[in-house]
Amino acid sequence: MKIERYSGEKEREILSAMVGNRLVLGRIASKWTVRGLFMSPWANAVGKLCIDFYRKFGDCPGKGIESVIRTWAEKQHDQATVELVEKFASSLEYNGGDELNHEHVLCVAGDYFNMVKLDRLIEEVQSHKE
């Protein structure tokens, strides 16, 4: 088992844009998978909440993400996961206004999601070798 340092900066940048920018969220929603696109489970949990919100209302949750997370948390049985998701979500800066360069964020997201897919493929191949 390899141990690596994890910062989550790219995940936070992408998720912040997903929470606050409808264009970014819409483009990512079209690529979303059941497993999610992020490496960390808590980022996938927040991402899925954003995707579900977009598919239901056609918009990004914005500051309303806190309410969405509270509603989700009430239905969860694993309090440790709820705390991690809430802590992770509180670190997001919901940037989605005019100052956001959505093309840059989408480029970063594409590169990041491709890296996650590659890492998952490598893990799958290695697990079949054993």
Image: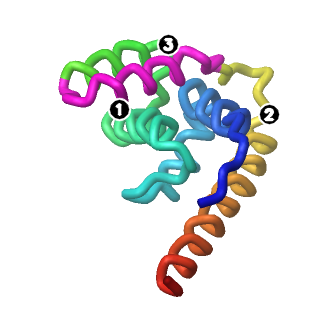
Residue with the mark numbered 3: 63
First reached walking from the N terminus: tag 3 or tag 1: 1
Q: Which mark is residue 57?
A: 1
Where 38 sits versus 124, above or below? above
* Among the two numbered marks 2 and 3 on one chain, the one whose residue lies closer to the N terminus: 3
Give the magenta-colored segment's residue range. 75-94
Q: Is residue 58 visible?
A: no
**Total label count?**
3
* Residue 84 forms part of the magenta stretch: yes
Q: Quadrant of the N terminus?
A: bottom right
The residue mark sitting in front, 3 or 1, is 3
The vertical placement of 97 against 103, above or below, is above
Q: Residue at x 70, y 55 (%)?
A: 110
The answer to whether 85 appears left or right of 114 in the picture is left
Q: How many residues crowd mark 3 within 10 Å: few (<14), some (14–19), many (20+)?
A: few
Q: Which badge, 1 or 2, comes first in the chain's sequence?
A: 1
Query: Residue at label 2?
Result: 101
Q: Residue at x 44, y 19 (%)?
A: 86
- Give the number of the mark in front: 2 or 3: 3
